[in-house]
Image: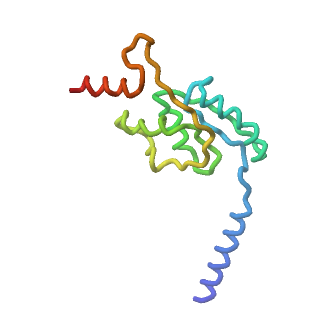
């Protein structure tokens, strides 16, 4: 009985050592962009792709998969083999609303993804016509609140 345990432990250790010796990445990496070509998100990713490929010593291929408010590409990434060779380039405001907008998603935005890098921060802004009565965000919010009464 003790011999079986010792052999089992030895097999486990050798298995763990060989698993640790595997290199990542072992094949090209697919980076899914759930937006149309030419967007600010895609342009930002293209700025880092060459360096990412150089550092990982593997090609990183950007694949645009737009549609359904970014849920099509996001779903494809969620269903990929979880070996780290398929990544998703997205942002919170694209992933989070899917659960609110669609009754059935093929993925759980909170459980199926793990954030690994912040690539950039993109400021957002609001504009109104120059003749609009709201001249500040506070003016605009006051108008919205007043219209709900």
Note whether 122 is above or below 140 in the view shown. Answer: below
Residue 67 appears left or right of 144: right
At x 60%, y 89%, the residue is 2
Residue 144 appears left or right of 69: left
At x 45%, y 12%, the residue is 130
Note whether 133 is above or below 55 in the view shown. Answer: above
**Residue 62, image x and y in percent?**
66, 33
Q: Nearer the viewer, residue 149 or 92?
A: 149
Q: Which residue occupies the extreme bottom position in the image?
A: 2
**Residue 10, image x and y in percent?**
67, 78
Note whether 3 is above or below 117 in the view shown. Answer: below
At x 36%, y 15%, the residue is 133
**Residue 149, image x and y in percent?**
21, 26
Quarter of the N terminus within the rendering: bottom right
At x 46%, y 29%, the residue is 69
Q: Nearer the viewer, residue 10 or 146?
A: 146
Q: Nearer the viewer, residue 42 or 88?
A: 42
- Where residue 6 sits, quadrant-wise, is bottom right
The number of numbered badges drawn on the structure is 0
**Residue 91, image x and y in percent?**
53, 38
Q: Which residue occupies the extreme left position in the image?
A: 149
């Amino acid at each position: 009985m003790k011999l079986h345990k010792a052999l089992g432990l030895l097999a486990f250790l050798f298995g763990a050592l060989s698993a640790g010796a595997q290199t990542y990445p072992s094949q090209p990496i697919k980076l899914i962009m759930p937006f149309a070509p030419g967007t600010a998100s895609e342009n930002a990713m293209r700025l880092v792709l060459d360096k990412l490929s150089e550092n990982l010593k593997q090609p990183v291929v950007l694949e645009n998969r737009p549609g359904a408010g970014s849920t099509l590409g996001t779903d494809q990434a969620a269903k990929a083999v979880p070996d780290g060779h398929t990544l998703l380039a997205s942002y919170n405001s694209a992933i989070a609303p899917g659960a609110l907008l669609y009754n059935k998603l093929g993925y759980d935005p909170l459980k199926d993804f793990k954030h690994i890098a912040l690539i950039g921060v993109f400021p957002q802004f609001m504009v109104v016509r120059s003749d609009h009565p709201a001249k500040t965000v506070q003016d605009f919010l006051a108008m919205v609140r007043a219209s709900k009464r």
